[in-house]
Image: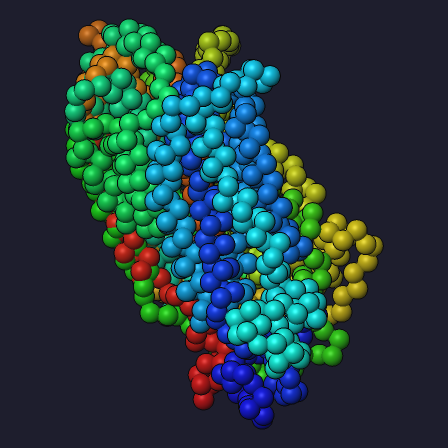
Amino acid sequence: MCEFKDKQDSVASEKTKLTVATVEGGNIIAGQPELSKGTEYFENALEVTTFGKFNYLLILISGVILANVLLETLGISFVLPVSQCDLNLTVYQRGVMSAIGFAGIISSSHLWGFLADTTGRRSIIRPTLLMGFVFTVVSSFSTNFWSLVILRFLNGFCISGGSATIYAYLGEFHTEKNRSRAIMGSAFIFGVGAMIMPGIAWLVINQEWRLPLTFLGLTYKPWRLFMVVCGIPGFLCGLSLFRIPESPKFLLSQGQEEECLQVLKDIYRFNTGKLKETFPVAHVIEDLDNNTRRHSSDERDKNPITALLISMWSQTQPLFNREYVMTTVLICTIQFWTFVTSNGMYMWFPDILNSVAEFMNANPDSSAYICNVVYEKHESILQFELARNVSDTMMERCNEKLDISTYQKSLILEFLYAVGFACIAVCGACGIAAPLISQPNIALYMYLILLLCGLGINVLSAATVDLYPTRLRAMAVCISLMMGRLGSVVGANIVGALITNHCEITFISSGVSLILAVLPVSVQEVSVQESGVVDNDKKKRPDESIPYSEALERTKFGRFNYYIIILSGLVLSNVLLETSGVAFIMPVAQCDLGLTNFRKGLLSAIGYVGMILSSHLWGFLADTKGRRRVIRPTILASFVVTLFSSFATNFWLILILRLLNGFFISGGSATIYAYLGEFHMDRTRSRAMMGSAFIFALGAMCMPFLAFIVINQDWSFPLPFLGIIYKPWRLFIIVCGITGLFCGLSLYYLPESPKYLLSAKREEEAKQVLQKIYRINCGKDELKLPHLLPEDDCAEIKIAMKSDSLLKTFLNTMWNQTIPLFHKKYLRSTLIVCTTQFWIYLIVNGLYMWFPHIINSMSEFMNTHPGENKLLCQIVYDKDEFLYHNDGSMECTNKLEDTTFMYSLLMEILYASSFAFLGVAINVLGAATVELYPTQLRAMAMCISLMMGRVGSVVGTNFVGALLSSYCELTFYISCFAMISCAFLILFLPKSIKDKTGKESNSNEC
């Protein structure tokens, strides 16, 4: 270990253990050079400025900026009830209005994040805040719904610049020991803003004054002023940023050392009151920590017949080596149970919400448990049209004031949502409460919060990419998702079996399982140091060679990266549409296909079964043959199968075709994380993952719209030669697959992962890909690259096919690829990942696959029983009781209740907006989990984790389908149990791997 000889010249001598890297290229220098007098690392120089008035001011401004985002986005909820007459807002338009601000934030978050990284933090935050206020002021003069929608979208588009960048801006003004305290301080101010929002609304909105503006054709009322008031904090912060400097760390990263020093001197003067000339630092260099290690693996020659299987196993096995097995198992477990709850329960979410909405409209003064509402849903079918007319009449009543209890409950609701986003265990607790609450409206919110556990799926998937090295990344993802999808299958079928008779147990079990599933996340830290690797490898670098990461950094971040992020998000959205879109089909196709609850469970789960069957195969092929070579053909093949399935004439035929569809789409869903991640450096990878997650969330938001536009049409087209009538639900199947067709065709124009090519000893091809990226991003013709050194985690990929038995070689290779995941080094990670994936998928997909059925049932009940309260599960019981007529024929539904789509959209909006607010958490998680596995195991770990998630989906969808009709309560209880379990499992995930690598590697060597 190298140390400074002149420690007295360092302000903080403990910082001298950092690895030195040049600012220009980040090249690792063999050995630790001495720093000249007056030269300090940035962290040390920042510490010299001390913590004082400037820091408190910046924390205050940052907290107010975050509070401004809250006021701008959620303040509209107080405006909608009192503005519906002025703007002629229907219920659906109010839903759009409440979501449009988040849509703007989602659509621009990634843009602002990358602009902040390239042009500066302050240069993004300041203009976006001011422009957001301008749009807020203009929107207060809106005369109709559409003008307000457009302006609120633009407002969200702008204010996202502050919310997405302020954490980085604030953190870079503080040393490591003060950074968390500063962020906590800004979060406290944000919390204060959330608490005072109802008070501001009460003071402004409940006024009597009016101001006619005849030249605009409107009357300016208090609710319009409230919109302006909500934007004032952003305006003040935008102005204050004219006096606050740019991030000094950003300036230094851009090579602007003089500007960085000037900012540090200004902070020093402001905090200490001393002259800038007394600042003891004359030169600043960046703090960069880049440890390099090598990993190699030997593979034996096997018979040609078994070579492929052997390679496949060798790709998976490292995930279960002692080093990674616990991490892999934990991630898979969390994925599984998250999918079980979020997808399993969400499948029934539209039906339950529809039933509750109908019940509350029919019985405004009555109380009932949510499960009773589900059981008794069918009792109100004959009065549906009358109740809907009554509901429409009630909508005409206009309010210009809100009762004070509205503001009080809003404060409570904001607190509950904040807690819900913070902890999966809370999602599980809400699921337990859902069937025990007799107010359907409140029960629906509990149900909705339960399904937010699905957020953990994408976060865990993005994290899993960084848990394993390159050669294992795809396999790990596939196995993880396989476990999650298995949870979906189990969840959907079990919920379907229990919901009608044991509704309460269904919900409570889901919640409890979630809480238990996150228990293992606090397992002891796991080392990812590869055997036989020493830091002295840095000294062995050839003169004319650069590491892959440095070559990738030279390509810059530009148009190519944006395109691949968008494409990756669309691939993920395609998987969602293909698997979850069937939830909207089953209620309206039950007569055409003769669907019973048991068959609905099978149909909702069969796609995940196909994904389970193929996850391991695609992970192996992606790690050995290439990422793009797997993603492209599988996506195109899945669309072909989707097209044929829309013409299915009976249940068994569509079941087989959906199985094949799941078999193919698994190739893209598991591999796309590795493909996307390997085009980005460590510092941009988490943000790229977040960008694709935003697009995925947008796809989720579009799904209810697509279902509403397509399914609720009246046309039908007889096809006598097939013996079917082509109805809108069949067209919806094709619509769900179009995204995959577009992505598959687009991949003909995208290259293979350069990191994979380098690990496969195809250096020249890797260079060509990097040069192509450089041309697209920089617009220049040539990027000269010397010999490329593989990263520490890019183990050479070899598939020997020389033995007599091809089958034996294939199995042996597959075993060798898989077994490292269960070695001691990775065992804990593998177990946690797989277990969590399983339960998350089980709950998410299991309940989501029955979501339209439950919501539709509740909407019908609420429309036919206005003013009556009933438990959700009771509505489900009643619905299934009247499923068949006296003559044995089945009760048919050709359309879904409009509220089914509305609540589905609400669910997706919350899902998407959660990604926007959890962006920082995603980055933090990505930065932490990158240490859990070396790159050579990341793909395999991700595949295994997501494979477990798919297993959870299979379990969840069947679980919900089996239980929902008869055991509604049990369905919720099981889902809650799963989510609570996941919350505990997460506590056992390894917190870091670098803690046992890098400098500690020296001690390990000794």
| Direction from residue 940 to residue 969 in the image, left or right | left
* Residue 645 shows up from this direction: no
Position of 571 relative to 723 (above/below): below
Position of 411 relative to 80 (above/below): below
Q: Position of residue 606 (x, y in %)?
A: 38, 34
Q: Position of residue 205 (x, y in %)?
A: 39, 29
> Residue furthest toward the bottom?
5
Near-viewer residue (85 or 425): 85
Quarter of the picture holding the C terminus = bottom left
| Direction from residue 201 to residue 18 in the image, left or right | right
Q: Residue at x 40, y 59 (%)?
A: 184
How many circles with numbers are drawn on the protein? 0
Q: Position of residue 764 (x, y in %)?
A: 74, 61
Near-viewer residue (222 or 504): 222
Position of 232 relative to 557 (above/below): above
Q: How is the image coloured?
A: rainbow
Q: Residue at x 51, y 85 (%)?
A: 13
Q: Residue 797 occupies which quadrant of the picture?
A: bottom right
Near-viewer residue (644 or 876): 876
Q: Residue at x 45, y 32 (%)?
A: 226
Q: Residue at x 43, y 27 (%)?
A: 222
| Direction from residue 816 to residue 21 in the image, left or right | right
Near-viewer residue (240 or 333): 240
> Residue furthest toward the right?
781
Q: Position of residue 485 (x, y in %)?
A: 38, 43
* Residue 251 shows up from this direction: yes
